[in-house]
Image (tube, grey):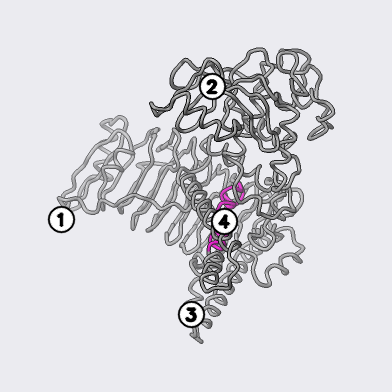
Amino acid sequence: MADGSLTCGGLEAAAVSPERTGWAAEQEPASLEKGLFQDEDSCSDCSCHDKPGSSLQSFMPEGKTFFPEIFQTNQLLFYERFRAYQDYILADCKASEVQEFTAEFLEKVLEPSGWRAVWHTNVFKVLVEATDVDFAALKAVVRLAEPYLCDSQVSTFTMECMKELLDLKEYRLPLQELWVVFDDSGVFDQTALAIEHVRFFYQNIWRSWDEEEEDEYDYFVRCVEPRLRLHYDILEDRVPSGLIVDYRNLLSQCEESYRKFLNLRSSLSNCNSDSEQENISMVEGLKLYSEMEQLKQKLKLIENPLLRYVFGYQKNSNIQAKGVRPSGQKVTHVVSSTMMAGLLRSLLTDRLCQEPGEEEREIQFHSDPLSAINACFEGDTVIVCPGHYVVHGTFSIADSIELEGYGLPDDIVIEKRGKGDTFVDCTGADIKISCIKFVQHDAVEGILIVHGGKTTLENCVLQCETTGVTVRTSAEFLMKNSDLYGAKGAGIEIYPGSQCTLSDNGIHHCKEGILIKDFLDEHYDIPKISMVNNIIHNNEGYGVVLVKPTIFSDLQENAEDGTEENKALKIQTSGEPDVTEGVDLEELMQCATGKMELYARTDPSEQVEGNCEIVNELIAASTQKGQMKKKRLSELGITQADDNLMSQEMFVGIVGNQFKWNGKGSFGTFLF
């Protein structure tokens, strides 16, 4: 039996000393076992089997039932995998040391022989028995178990064929392809769990190019933790479905580019001649390398929870506008769960009576607002009567329509339940929404996303859960006399190239009040922003945050800036990409200001100062954008640029806004 065998049905009774982690367990195998199988709380007897992850259950493989049960190991919780990789397997190793550290870990916990396993591939599964383990290669030496059990998708796959295949592999199989057969004695629990950790790591965490990345920094902090968090965020529906697809596509593209790069590098190393073909190959290799680096940077943006939040997911809406109704007629849709005579009389008087000479309108009645919106064509109106409406789908508005509540917002409540990416998607040229309260639950994305066109929100209440309102590039958003609160991200996210007018609104109790994204790149313009008489208060972070890259003299200027409101944490995406990735993720948005302090800005002079800070930063960003455009035009041989055109990218106006009780102050800059 391997050193460090399990006792007490799979667990040692003694508690793990909190000071002993990592390879201290080498001298105390029981502590290693305990760390792998349970949480930090100690237990004095075998009752600790009742804790999550403290014992392994059996699982019947899919397919034919003649196979024995295997250990159920694929339902481990995040913290169980996190502690295993951090404290016992990888510790502070570099990327180039991963296999070595994993081998050392397996030597301590893996039974070298005597256990059976199902060798599972995409084509077949067969029962084998381990006779030895090659720890350095992360492989097990096996033989066919008796009786011979095999389930193959190919009917001609006989026992002789299997023996020939094993002989070609020298009877050595990768551990991640083996699922240990269940044994209720507890002897092989740690073997099954250790193999699961190896399998999960190489399937979900390890990338083939990791070994060639910078090796000076802790591999666990730099790569393992963010990828592990992303994996569980995806499992728990905390990542938009479109972003998941993008991430997997990026992974495939990066793997393909890396494979081509390796093949090209190998062919160059075998070529000694200074031929023209070699020069062409070197140019192609540099191009592949550049492409691969860009893909890796995009992957890192998605893997890092903070950057994933800051940059957001720019999905393209697939909503198709219906256009004008074939009959050419416009319809008024009335939504009411129950229609009383008094309500109908009021509606006829206030909304449905036609003016003399006005075109005849059709009226349709609906019991829920979602069906009414789905029935709309260009120019239709939806009137929602007082009531509490629960919907399970997304409001996809692609035509220019009006959605209005008949009464006060608190009397017209539309609540979204059920998992889904968005609540309200707007792409119409001119959409108007008024006098409605939207309540969001179980969300992945924001409560309202304006993908394109113009959306006006007036006299509404938005009770958010994730992000509040997102205004995408090229979209226009007007929000008046409305109340927005509860976002775990930013109350309003404003993307480059968009237009946003906020007037007389309350934005409060969010992580950040307003987040303005400024990408100083040729593909993006400064957003046009007007903020007048808004009250931005009680947000966890800043009232307004400007996100922009560290370029030119800003690097030094911001580093020397001593005021707490304007200090920024620099997240570098080139040069030294890994310096800040070891910082705790919860500390990133604190912008290196130390501990948070709640304070109120009630002095009018300070409120004016807060508005001026936003104005000055937007002017500076716009000026830098103009300088970059001039430089690019100059490089193209165009000696003059249109200053008036560039000045139009600036804000429209930012006056009269009040910032109160925001955790970090009225305004901050986030540099990436």
What amino acid type should be assigned to the residue bearing mark 4? Leu
Q: Earlier in the sequence, mark 2 or mark 1?
A: 2
What residue is shown at x 69% (from left), y 36% (from top)?
A: 85
Q: Answer with left or right where residue 158 lies relative to residue 349.
A: right
Q: Comparing marks 1 and 4, which lies closer to the viewer?
A: 4
**Which part of the image, by quadrant, shows the N terminus?**
top right
Q: Secondary structure at mark 3?
A: helix
- Camera-side residue of 71 and 282: 282
Query: Residue 357 has which mark?
Result: 1
What amino acid type should be assigned to the residue bearing mark 1? Gly
Q: For residue 290: magenta? A: yes
Q: Earlier in the sequence, mark 3 or mark 1?
A: 1
Q: Answer with left or right where residue 321 lies relative to residue 121.
A: left
Q: For residue 134: magenta? A: no
Disc 3 to disc 2: CB gap under 8 Å: no
Image height of 227 relative to 167, above or below: below
Give the prevailing secondary structure in the magenta stretch. Answer: helix
> Residue 143 appears in which quarter of the rendering?
top right
Q: Which residues are magenta?
A: 288-309
Query: Residue 644 has which mark?
Result: 3
Label 3: few (<14), some or many (≥20) within 10 Å? Answer: few
- Camera-side residue of 218 and 103: 103
Q: CA distance from mark 1 to mark 4?
A: 75 Å
Q: CA distance from mark 3 to mark 2?
A: 75 Å
